Amino acid sequence: MATRPTASSESVRSRMSRQRQRGTRAELRVRQALHARGIRFRVDVRLESDLRCRADIAWRALRLAIFIDGCFWHGCPIHATRPKANQEWWARKLDENVRRDRRTDAELTSRGWTVLRYWEHEEPETVAAVIYRTLSDLRPSGRGTVT
């Protein structure tokens, strides 16, 4: 990808520098909903030593990886927008993010992982409920509670 362009204004530069890569508000809300259900997990997990990706939430033993994707950065079909400045660069950058997500999902799935992706705008309780059901399905029968 071409060199990152300079910010179109000081306010844009400041805002972009504060973008979190982990521990976003959406992630924290889903984590709180999981904790409320008594579910424990690992956060910001490198899933495979030879892959660059990190799951927002994961259970290694069950090979379950959760990604909470930001609407802007990952191309949400409902909320994604494109910046007006440096349009060509941003189009390439954001399109590549979507392609990378698809490659990551395919690679992890081929290695036996269950991959669940959610948008930041999805209701945390609903996300937690689906994760809980998935954990229950993946857990070996007779192995107690989902943690």
Image: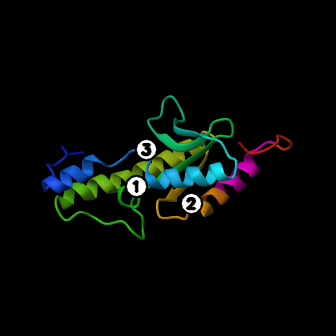
- Determine the CA span between mark 1 and mark 2: 22 Å
Element type at mark 3: loop
Residue positioned 82% across, 42% down in the render: 144
Label tally: 3
Answer yes or no: is residue 116 visible. no
| Residue 131 shown left or right of residue 43 in the figure | right
Measured as percent of width and height from the top left, residue 56 is found at: 51, 45
Q: Nearer the viewer, mark 1 or mark 2?
A: 2
Element type at mark 2: helix
What span is in magenta? 130-140
- Determine the CA span between mark 3 and mark 1: 18 Å
| Residue 120 shown left or right of residue 146 in the figure | left
Instruction: Determine if the magenta segment contains residue 136.
Output: yes
Provide the residue designation for mark 3. 22
Provide the residue designation for mark 2. 124
Residue positioned 40% across, 56% down in the render: 74
User: Callout 1, which amino acid?
Assistant: Val
Hey, which residue is sitting farthest right in the picture?
142
User: Callout 2, which amino acid?
Assistant: Pro
Q: Which mark is residue 115?
A: none
Does the residue at mark 1 contact the one at mark 2 (Cβ under 8 Å)? no
Q: Upstream in the sequence, badge 3 or badge 2?
A: 3
Closest to the observer, 82 or 26: 26
- Determine the CA span between mark 3 and mark 2: 16 Å
Measured as percent of width and height from the top left, residue 83 is found at: 23, 63
Provide the residue designation for mark 1. 98
Is residue 127 shown above or below 44?
A: below
Instruction: Determine if the magenta segment contains residue 63.
Output: no
Residue positioned 42% across, 68% down in the render: 77
Residue positioned 41% across, 56% down in the render: 70
